[in-house]
Amino acid sequence: MKRYVDKFIRYLQIEKEASVHTIRNYSADLKEFSSFLADKKIEDVDYLSLRKFLAYLRSINLNKSSIARKLSALRSFFKFLERENYIKSNPITGLSTPKKDKKLPAFLDEREVIRLLDIPADNLSGKRDKAILEVLYSSGIRVSELVGMNTEAIDFVSEVIKIYGKGKKERITPIGSKAVLAIRQYRDMLPAKFKSNKAVFLNRNGGRLTDRSVRRIVNKYILLACKKENISPHTLRHSFATHLLNRGADLRSVQELLGHANLSTTQIYTHVTTERLKAVYDKVHPRA
């Protein structure tokens, strides 16, 4: 089993150019599956084996989202094995993925966002943090996409940035004048010795900020701005989409801005706006 997993991971890294996050998760999921199989050969894995694994995942009270991700890893794995003729048929074909519970994404209202953006101090680290917050909210990009941003990807005149999203897909997205100004002010304050670094956002030693560092920075400011549960850096992305829809943006445009492959992924935000409309209705309609 291990040699097949190693081949698959190399395929993801070299041919698919999968993200580090995907590689890490798929490796862990396949390691767990291999452990569950014990000494069973990959050629002997059938539909029943997979059903038993699914039952095992449910028995340890794993949530539906995690189960769906593990099954997605297995689907990709067995598809690879079948294509490379390591197995004669794909045993996972008939196995259905449990429907994930749809949770409304947490988001900040516009006043909370304004309060959030006013918190960073007027020094170098504060300028950097403000630029990070401005870019995340004004563009809706993911933290991983922000971390990978280079200076040449920013068009300061047109106020757009080139982003490399999931699966190395490239897109152009606007970031707005306030975010552009915040980046300029931060970069102007950088020590001369750091300005040659092509990364936009740097740590105190002049190196590129990591995903974890950005999440820690954003979490700190969000907690200062509002005390809500289930708030994370992704909350700014949710806020971006929600505010656009609340102000009349069409769903297809929001899908493009977020870099979603499927419109169904973006549609979760329509539930948020519907909840807002219902709240307004209940508050003002005389027969509500």
Image (cartoon, helix red, strand yellow):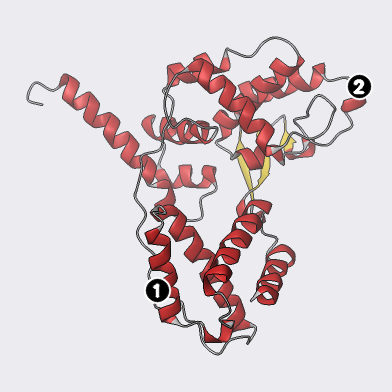
- Residue pointed to by mark 1: 51
The residue under the point 73% across, 18% down is 125
Nearer the observer, 43 or 280: 43
| Nearer to the camera, 235 or 270 | 235
Q: Amino acid at mark 1?
A: Arg
Answer yes or no: is residue 159 visible: no
Q: Is residue 152 above or below residue 80?
A: above
Q: Is residue 23 visible?
A: yes
Seen from this angle, which residue lies furthest bottom? Answer: 88
Rendered image quadrant of residue 233: top right
Residue 128 drawn at (x, y percent)? 71, 22
Mark 1 or 2: in front is 1
Q: Which amino acid is tagged 2? A: Ala
Does residue 66 appear left or right of residue 18 in this picture?
left
Q: Which dot marks residue 192?
A: 2
Asked where in the image residue 161 lies, by quadrant, the reply is top right
Which residue occupies 51% across, 20% down?
A: 223
